[in-house]
Image (cartoon, rainbow, N blue to C red):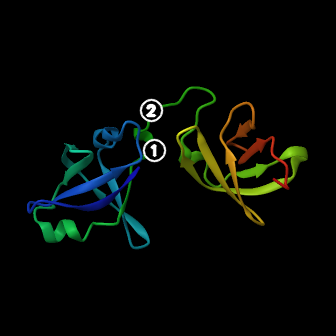
Amino acid sequence: MGRVVGVFGIKGWVKVFSHTQPRENILQYDPWWLAEGDGWRRVALAGGQRHGKGLIARLAGVTDRDVAQALVGRDIAIDRAQLPALPEGEYYWSDLIGLQVYGTGGVPLGRVKELIETGAHDVLVVQGERERLIPWAVPQIVKAVDLAAGRIDVDWAADY
């Protein structure tokens, strides 16, 4: 959902980069899970607000700059149950990452590594024998998404 990118002030507030739309939506979720080593640590959100062009947040138990500094660089996640249900044909990016992508004629192209937001449209980054950037254009390019089967079918030739 986001990442702790810096500290703000001396009372333990952190600067947050949010992947939500709009960005402030990340402040509506509580608790947060912060990446920690090989796992995640649950933290309660004690406050948050827009500050300039970014966001700042206060986490329960974080009361000084040194403790906040130790959180910089950690990814922020939330419980899946906190997300609203989407209408048919819409997907959370996290649901698409890892799906196998099949091109024209059923040729396997690789797996979705990540998605990139561009001005025109989002782009699937597909990692296979090589990396491919495939526009998320429904129905022109993206023909079908089957989350249960772990599959995306696209109108995209293997030699593109």
Quarter of the view holding residue 109: bottom right
Instruction: Report the residue at 69% width, 32% height from top.
Output: 138
In the image: residue 61, left or right of residue 27? left
Tell me: 90 left or right of 26: right
- Image x and y of residue 122, in percent: 58, 42
State the residue position of label 2: 84
Residue 76 position by quadrant: bottom left
Q: Residue at x 58, y 46 (%)?
A: 95
Callout 2: SS: loop
Q: Residue at x 78, y 42 (%)?
A: 153
Nearest the viewer among 95 and 128 is 128
Three-letter amino acid code at the position of disc 2: Pro
Number of residues whose C-alpha sits closer than 10 Å to that of mark 2, classed few (under 14), some (14–19) or many (20 or more): few
Left or right: where does residue 124 sit relative to residue 16?
right
Q: What label does residue 28 carry, if any?
A: none
Residue under the image location 29 percent in, 66 percent down: 72
Q: Which residue is mark 1?
A: 80
The answer to which image quadrant residue 3 occupies is bottom left
Percent x, y of residue 159 = 85, 56
Residue 6 at x, y percent in the picture: 25, 62
Does residue 140 appear to the left or right of 89 in the view shown? right
Crowding around mark 1 (Cα neighbors within 10 Å: few <14, some 14 to 19, many 20+) is: few
Q: Amino acid at mark 1?
A: Arg
